[in-house]
Amino acid sequence: MSVADLGYYVLVFTTMTILAVPATMGLPFLLTRYISKYVVSDDFASIKGLLIKSNTFVLYSTLAIYAVAFATYFFWWKKYDSVIVETLLYGFLLLPLLGLSALRASALRGMKLVILAELPDTLLRNLWFTVLLVGAVLIDYQLSPKVAIIFQIFATALSFLLGLVFLNNKLLRQIQHLKPVFNTKEWIRQTIPFSINSGIQVVRSKLLNYILVWFGSVEAVAIFDVAMRGANLVAYTLNALNSAISPFVSSAFEKKDMVYLQRIIKKTGRIIFMFSLPVGLVFIVGGKGLVQFIFGEEYGASYIPLVILCIGQLVSSMAGSVGLLLSMTGNQKVFSNSNIQMLIILVVTSIPMVIYLDVTGAAIVISFTLIIQNIILLKYVRKNLNINTSIF
């Protein structure tokens, strides 16, 4: 694909990722926390009730989003470029798959089956998507944003079905004959800050794609996406281990075992930094040649933004799993307030930075807000939870 075509694909996939936030409303975080809590108390009836309510909500919310999208099509996005409109129409098929896959993975994480939770989406979906792309290249099939989205739909559907098999074998069979218990009021009350956190985190990471296309170009979106992909590799260990330890953090906090909780957080933080540092250094030292070799000469402009984003991710890895700790210990409101503040800073600063510095400005804003937030939250957990999440 051309740089512009990649930009269109990124915008459509970004839109579906953002729409998945109101479709799930923080339920994946709620599932991980409460399923791990219910496992400790042997309350599998409540687990069944929570799974029923969460899956029902995602299905209804997805239908509501479809209704809004259908209504707005005729007087709004129908007027856009035909390439992006056609790609969007196919992209909406991703929405229920993304939402239900997130619930399935969170339920498995809550059961402390981390590998089974992460395998379908983290590894296999990307593997199948890559196989489809490579196959298209080998047979000289013309790739387009629409084709790339269709490939993504197939890869996501296969991953979802495999994950559903895992969940059925490890949990659903055990609870199929139980009468569900619904703690609906408590779940709604607790899911609000989770939904705020998940929503703001997604918007923070994706909003700049829209700002770049509004105040820059669709090509800038593609350049920024390449830089973000490299930075996400630096953050991969952080995200993977956060998913792995979240049920253990929740269980340790429920048992009031703060010594064990501190040990988990400290060891995890040091492992995160140990793996993140070499990846970051590779991109900082030799990122330009690596990007041009993988994506092409025209993507060399992503090198400086990549370096800036890598620095932000390395500082974040030094701070450790501070956001996860707050979310899994009942302090998600603190995390919500911090995310709201950082989003405001990002919105206020990103437009002038993009206008004057283009993709580099977007990278500076992302790294700046990430570093500031981690410093503030690190101080908070040290003072109020007496836990040190940093590597030091």
Image (spheres, rainbow, N blue to C red):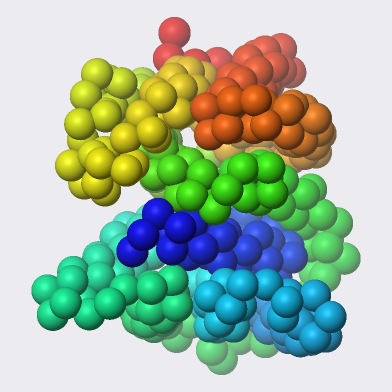
Residue at coordinates 24% horizontally, 46% vertically from top-left? 296
Is the residue 368 above or below the residue 112 in the image? Answer: above
* Quadrant holding the C terminus: top left
Is the residue 333 above or below the residue 381 in the image? Answer: below
Q: Position of residue 87 (x, y in %)?
A: 53, 77
Residue at coordinates 25% horizontally, 41% vertically from top-left? 297
Q: Where is residue 169 in the image (x, y as percent from the top left)?
A: 37, 80
User: Which quadrant of the figure has residue 30?
Assistant: bottom right
User: Which quadrant of the figure has residue 164?
Assistant: bottom left
Is 341 placed left or right of 12 in the picture?
A: right
Is the residue 294 above or below the residue 366 in the image? Answer: below
Is 14 placed left or right of 297 in the picture?
A: right
Q: Where is residue 326 in the image (x, y as percent from the top left)?
A: 66, 34
Is 138 placed left or right of 308 in the picture?
A: left
Q: Which of 367 and 47 is in front in this view?
A: 367
Residue at coordinates 64% horizontally, 32% vertically from top-left? 354
